[in-house]
Image (cartoon, rainbow, N blue to C red):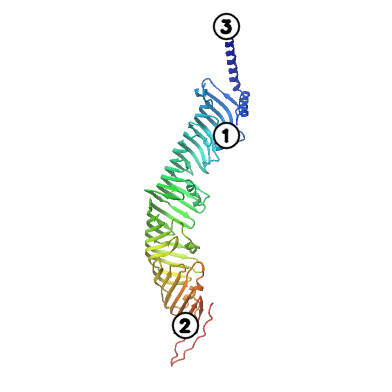
Amino acid sequence: MKFIGKLLLWLLIALLLVVVAFYFLLQTRWGAREVSGWISSNTDYHIAFDAMDHRFSSPSHILLKNVTFGRDGKPATLVAKTVDIGLSSRQLTDPLHADTITLQDGTLNLSPSTAPFPFEADTLQLSNMAFNSPETGWDLSAQRVTGGVSPWLPEAGNVLGKQAQIQMSAGSMTLNSMPATNVLVQGSIDNGVVTLGTVGADIARGSLTGNAKRNADGSWLVDSLRLTDIRMQSEKSLADFFAPLTTVPSLTIGSLEVTDARLQGPDWAIADLDLSLRNITLSKGGWNSDGGRLSMNADEFIYGSLHLTDPIFNAEFSPKGVALRQFTSRWEGGMVRTSGNWLRNGDALVLDDTAIAGLEYTLPPNWKQLWMESLPDWLQNVTLSKFTASRNLVIDIDPAFPWQITSLDGYGDNLQLAKNGNWGVWNGNAALNAAAATFNRVDVRRPSVKLTANGSVVNINELSAFTEKGILEATAAVSQQPERQTAISLNGRGVPLNILQQWGWPVLPITGDGNLQLRAKGTVQASAPLKPTVNGQLHATNMAKQEVTQTMTNGEVSTPQPVAPAPTNAAPASVPTPAPLAQ
């Protein structure tokens, strides 16, 4: 018995010596190389470290130095100057589950190809780490990261686990190409639901604070978000800039506050923007809201050729549509003011009160093409319940027929300017007048027009203007059918007889001032020329009592010899030779 007892004692002493020797060998470069080589050869992972350190002052901690870890054939998942593994009694039953794992001074690359990790921890801590998350919906890169994940239970497709508390800060971060500094994130993960209880960062020379939740289906709920002093330049168009909002299944905004923001793109810019948005959900290219509202103002808003100064916009959202409480802006040297409603039923914009004053506006060169283009699906009908204009200057620089209207005033009632997605004058009445105008280099004074429109015809009941020496008066009717049959009746008294020449009628064989009577019909269509459709008759009499009647058939004019006044006893009348006709 004594012999057996001594044998067991020597065996225990030998085992203890082996453990002690192994303990000290592990803390050498040779021991670290041998252990890392054995793990790399017998598992699907590659690991390398320079040395292992253990101190009796912290007996439950193992310190690995200059660690590289990853899956075989893949880039390294972890490169760290120091890895501190905190052990507990749990290692007796679950050797790969640590109490704490602390990564310091290195880089951690997390992607689906790197998961699952072979180990777990009650807490994963990062200290001055770089963090990259490629190949995911979150293209994330962060530097100087400090924080923790608790518990850390990684699995395939979820490198942070299904349930965890997260608290991290980063000196700098880039998320989906958006750079930020001084980032703070506190939140949790619960079976695909990511809750960000606190988010703070410095972005675009401004700051961001808020909280949000991302559901398992990818939809977002932004409970509160505040952006202050943002200064951002983008290479994207305005539509592309906001395109990410349409890629998520839905985005619900509880509160969004923007203060003193400046945003700029290739053909757009917003200066000194203040915005407040409440209770709205964006989904599948549309929106819905019950009790939402939007208030915004800016120093400038530029979009292509549109340049608004000091715009103010206030609106309220409901299931029925948008109540536009206020829109005012300085535009083209003048002022625009309106209010009204956009109705979801019928995609109709009904403006209760619209005023335009003091504009100095040059129409874009392609305004005729824009007028003929179909409107977007969300804007199929536009009606001005009340419309007023005062002291406006409108210019068209089309070289084929330039015109300018000076000091334009007007009013309108129930004026429908768009119907079923097409611009036009579809209903209502309007009256316009101006101090002066020029139409293709013909000057007139006090031009005025009154019109009424219904579903079948636009009636121009009054159209008049003073010329240099006389007055022109006309009435007209334009059919609302696709053929746009148009009829005009024009009378001129004491006017230059060549006045219609600048507006497209051929040269008259008589000259001077006199009276005109024109009756014509034609078809006004954007896809076909007007001239071949015109049929009409022009009768003119000059001050010398010479008369001529021209008949136009399919745009071509036949002209008889002018009729001279009857001779008197004092002197016979002579008939001048008619001038050649311009064809």
**Relative to residue 51, is residue 257 drawn left or right?**
left
- Above or below, comparing residue 188 to residue 304 in the picture: above
Name the spot of residue 4 as percent of width and height, x first. 58, 9
Q: Nearer the viewer, mark 2 or mark 3?
A: 3
Q: Which mark is residue 2?
A: 3
The amino acid type, in three-letter code, at marker 1 is Thr
Estimate how packed mark 2 is, as few (under 14), some (14 to 19) or many (20 or more) residues with alpha carbons within 10 Å.
many
Q: How far apart are marks 2 and 3 (CA)?
A: 150 Å
Front residue of this view, candidates 246 and 53: 246
Question: Hey, what amino acid is under mark 2?
Answer: Val
Mark 2 touches mark 1? (CB < 8 Å): no
Q: Where is residue 510 in the image (x, y as percent from the top left)?
A: 48, 82
Q: Against 91, is 131 above or below?
A: below
**Residue at numbered disc 1:** 77
Q: Residues within 10 Å of mark 3 (few under 14, many from 20)?
A: few
Of all residues, the one furthest to the top in this rendering is 2
Count residues near mark 1 (Cα–Cα under 10 Å), then give few for <14, some for 14-19, many for 20+: many
x 47%, y 89%: residue: 573
Residue 45 visible in the displayed image: no
Q: Earlier in the sequence, mark 1 or mark 3?
A: 3
Pinpoint residue 337: horizontal percent, then vertical percent.
38, 58
Whether label 1 touches label 3, CB < 8 Å? no
What is the x, y in percent for residue 266? 52, 52
Q: Quickly name the residue at label 2.
A: 548
Does label 2 or label 3 sit earlier along the sequence?
Answer: 3
Q: In the depicted view, which residue is nearer to us: 401 or 13? A: 13
Q: Which of marks 1 and 3 is in front?
A: 3
Alpha carbons under labels 1 and 3: distance apart: 56 Å
Q: Residue furthest bottom?
A: 569
Point 46% across, 38% down: residue: 194
Q: Is mark 3 on a helix, strand or loop?
A: helix
Q: What's under tag 3, amino acid-wise?
A: Lys
